[in-house]
Image: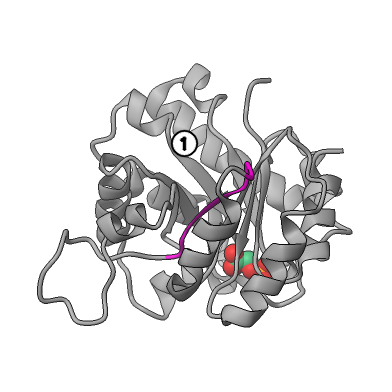
Amino acid sequence: MTRKKVFGGNWKMNHGLADTEAFLQDFINTKLSSECEVVLFPPFTNLHLMQKYLKASGISYGAQNFYCEEKGAFTGEVSLGMLKELGCTWVLTGHSERREIFKESDELVAKKTRMALDAGLTPMVCIGESLEEKNAGKTKEKLNNQVRSALEGMSESDVLKLTFAYEPIWAIGTGVNASQSDAQEGCKLVRTTLANLYGNEIAQEISICYGGSVKPGNIEGYMSQGDIDGGLVGGASLKSDDFSTLVNNGVK
Ligand code: PGA
């Protein structure tokens, strides 16, 4: 299988400058497997430190968000051009916290994903169902709709540049992680939708991560599942030793 393994560290609104420098000074000196891509997603205010410390390290970084305009009167927002100047090569789109708290619609997620691709960045497109949707048996429908809408108008070569993250909302930051089979089921649903739209050969090329209370102790189990190619990690990416252990356990 040629699929790339990807481990993303989504710091959310955590770590100021001092904590970020302490993390990076440690992280760049840890031995990380070269068999995967590691991507840090810190707050905007720390991206310049990523640029300073991670240059030539082989560790990638990106932003958790951006605004879908090039420039102008958009108080408080940050553009893709600004992120590129800071050396970002990845962005998250569709994270459930942006969908739920900041009311980002499927249409906006699709637009942002398109813009990120056009700007030459790699989007990690996040999707996932809520507990109510899971209990109502609507997981399949929700994932299918989210994936299809994010891919609206995308060519085969576009879709091959994407990475997905299946993150059931009920498992994010709760410590209630999905079972290996639930996580596999969700990632497989994403792959099946990709296969239905673009054919199986293309679907088999695309990396799909699982996210939701991923820890150094449970990543190996998730990675043993056929359709899980990595992890999108919140809490366990905040400490350098936790995250490096998690990455190395994930590629064992
Ligand atoms: P968590 O967050 O690992 O803290 O559950 C994952 C995410 O939201 O990306």
Drawn side of residue 68 relative to residue 215, left or right? left
Q: Residue furthest left?
A: 73
Residues 201 and 136: in front is 201
Residue 61 is inside the magenta segment:
yes
Quadrant holding the N terminus: top right
Relative height, residue 116 to residue 97 (above, below): above
Count of numbered badges drawn on the protein: 1
The answer to whether residue 191 of the structure is visible from this angle is yes
The residue at 59%/53% (across/down) is: 54
Residues 241 and 65: in front is 241
Drawn side of residue 128 relative to residue 186, left or right? left
Res 230 quadrant in image:
top right
The residue at 46%/33% (across/down) is: 194
The residue at 26%/41% (across/down) is: 118
Residues 155 and 14: in front is 14
Residues 82 and 109: in front is 82
From the top left corner, tell me how far across and down residue 115 is, in percent.
25, 48
Q: Could you tell me which secondary element the residue under label 1 belongs to?
A: helix
Quadrant holding the C terminus: top right
The residue segment tinted magenta is 57-64
Drawn side of residue 56 relative to residue 30, left or right? left
Residue 238 is inside the magenta segment:
no
